[in-house]
Every structure is written in C-alpha cells, then in structure tokens.
Amino acid sequence: MLSILIPVYNYSVVRLVRELHRQAEQLFIDFEIIVMEDGSSERLEENRQIDELSFCKYIVLEKNIGRSGIRNRLADMAKYGHLLFLDCDAEVCSAYFVEKYVSFCREESVVVGGTAYDENFNDPDYSLRLKYGRLREARPATLRNKLELNGKSNFSAFNFLIAKSIFNRIRFDETISGYGHEDTLFGHQIHELGFTVFHIDNPLIHKGLDNNQVFMSKTEEGIRNLYFLFQTGRYPFLAKESSLLNSFLTLKKMSLIDFFSWLYQIFRHPLYTNLCSSNPSLFLFDLYKLLYFCHYSKKMTR
C-alpha cells in the first residue's frame, strides 16, 4: 500500500522514523520505510538503528547524487503503489499523520500535506528563515488549494504523497544541479499530465532550519539556478511559474537591468544587514532577490 521514502544528508532521522513506524503499525496496513543516506558523513551510526525496525530499510550511498537523484532512486526501490516523500529535517506533529495520507492510497493522486514551524523557536539568528517560512510556506490547505486553482502552483517536495504510476511518468530532473527549483519543475509536470495537486492540512514541522547567513547564501544559489534553467530554453514555462523571473523579464523589456544591477551594488550591504537582523523585512527580501537577479544576469552576459 504505502512506501515512506526519506532522503537523508547529515541529519538524525531516528525519532522521525520511529514515530512514522509506530503510526503505520497501528493502522495494520502494508507499508515500508526506506531511508537513504545521500553521501552523508555524519549521524551514520545513530541512523543505523533504523535497520532494527520491521519493514524498514536503511541504505547508505557513499557518493552524493543530489536532491533529484536520491528521490528517483528511492522511488525505484519502493514496492508499493503510493509513495510518501518526506524530508529528513521534519518532525511529526499529529498522531494521525500517516492515517490522513492512507485515505488517498486508493486512487491515483498527488497530495501535499504542508509545512509548519515550531511556535516556541524564535532564535534571532534564524529570523529570516522563520519569518519566510511562517508567512510564505505555512499556509492552510484552503489557501493553497485556492492558489492551485488560480494556476499558482504550490507544490513542495518537503511532505507529499504521490501514486507511483504518476511519479514514474515524471521523475525529478537529475540534470538540475545546485540548490532550488526541482520542486517547481516537478509540480509543473504534474499539471502537464492533467493531474491536480490536492493540498491538505497534514503538516510536518520543519526543524532543520538555516541561519540567516546560510539562508541568504542558498537564496542566491537558487536565483543563479533559476537563471541557468531559464537560459537553457528548455523551461519556458518558468516565466509564469516564478514571479521573480517574471519581474526580471519585465525589467528587461524596459531596459532597466543595468540600473537595477547598479542599485544592487549600492544597496546590497544595508539590505543584507536588515535581512540578517532580528526583524527582517520580507518586502526587502523580495527586493534583494530581484536586484541580485539583475546583477547576476548582467555579470553572466558580459
């Protein structure tokens, strides 16, 4: 019935797996949990405890094959008809987490459970990631489904169920290297096949957060990746899927890229200071991303 698939990179997943295993056993369903280390060098001995649990497999890959590759490999190993993908840095916050997904295992479906954040965690070193997550990601299912109906994809690979028959027609694009946007492409392919992503209120708490400096670095990497993907010409739909890319292309039509690149050089440091402060502005975060995109594109076209 259900294959629970968890890619891992240098993170302890014993607590997560034990809770998922406990819930699945109580439902008396056919299930398996496959945990795969993607070239990890830490927490390996701790995570080996997973092998002691029934219906669980713990696999260590010596070489890192990337966010897309590891998910495809897990899907290939799965023996059941529905795949529940979960990121390793998650915590179960409902006693009915697995049960809510099982009700969708009788049909071809794609279901996204959502993301939540620990209300008691307010470390200022993580202020930007927390604010972004709570205001942009931790949305109720009613809002996410409404956005989906309006053509604004909200697909996230952090916590989702998909029929294996659908997954095998899509798979994650392993040509994507670096951080960001494999979710965007996967979600687009779901719609291209004529399937609808259905959102439910069944979140996991996102625990493995990046501090402000790391989150900014990953944001910049994601922007560079977005620019590269669009420049290949293979993903023209990205202009509609990404509001950032759409804004960039609008500025390009208005011949304002040089000006915005200049603004980035002038205001980069004060913007960065705000975004790494205890009370960052998401408006300034969006502005920073657009300025950085313009600056990077100019750099790449010199």
Image (spheres, grey):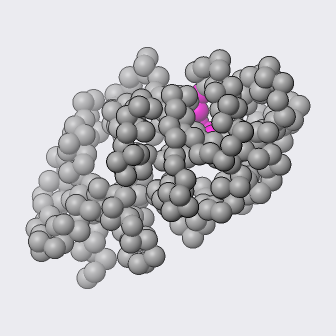
Q: Residue at x 43, y 17 (%)?
A: 120
Q: Nearer the viewer, residue 172 or 106?
A: 106
> Residue pushed farthest bottom?
302
Where does residue 121 sit, x and y in percent of width and height? 43, 21
Q: Is residue 64 visible?
A: no
Q: Residue at x 38, y 64 (%)?
A: 238
Q: Is 5 situated above or below 180?
A: above
Q: Residue at x 20, y 42 (%)?
A: 283
Q: Is residue 218 visible?
A: yes
99 on left or right of 27 = left
Q: Is 187 situated above or below 146?
A: below
Q: Nearer the viewer, residue 165 or 75?
A: 165
73 on left or right of 264 = right
Where does residue 64 sit, x and y in percent of width and height? 67, 59
110 on left or right of 245 = right
Q: Quadrant of the C terminus?
A: bottom left
Residue 247, picture quadrant: bottom left
Specify the segment rendered in magenta.
86-91
Q: Quadrant of the N terminus?
A: top right
Where does residue 229 sit, x and y in percent of width and height? 43, 70
Residue 249 in the magenta stretch? The answer is no
Q: Is 86 situated above or below 95?
A: below
Q: Nearer the viewer, residue 163 or 209?
A: 163
Q: Residue at x 39, y 25 (%)?
A: 123
Q: Nearer the viewer, residue 131 or 253?
A: 253
Callout count: 0
Residue 88 in the magenta stretch? The answer is yes
Where does residue 255 sit, x and y in percent of width and height? 12, 74
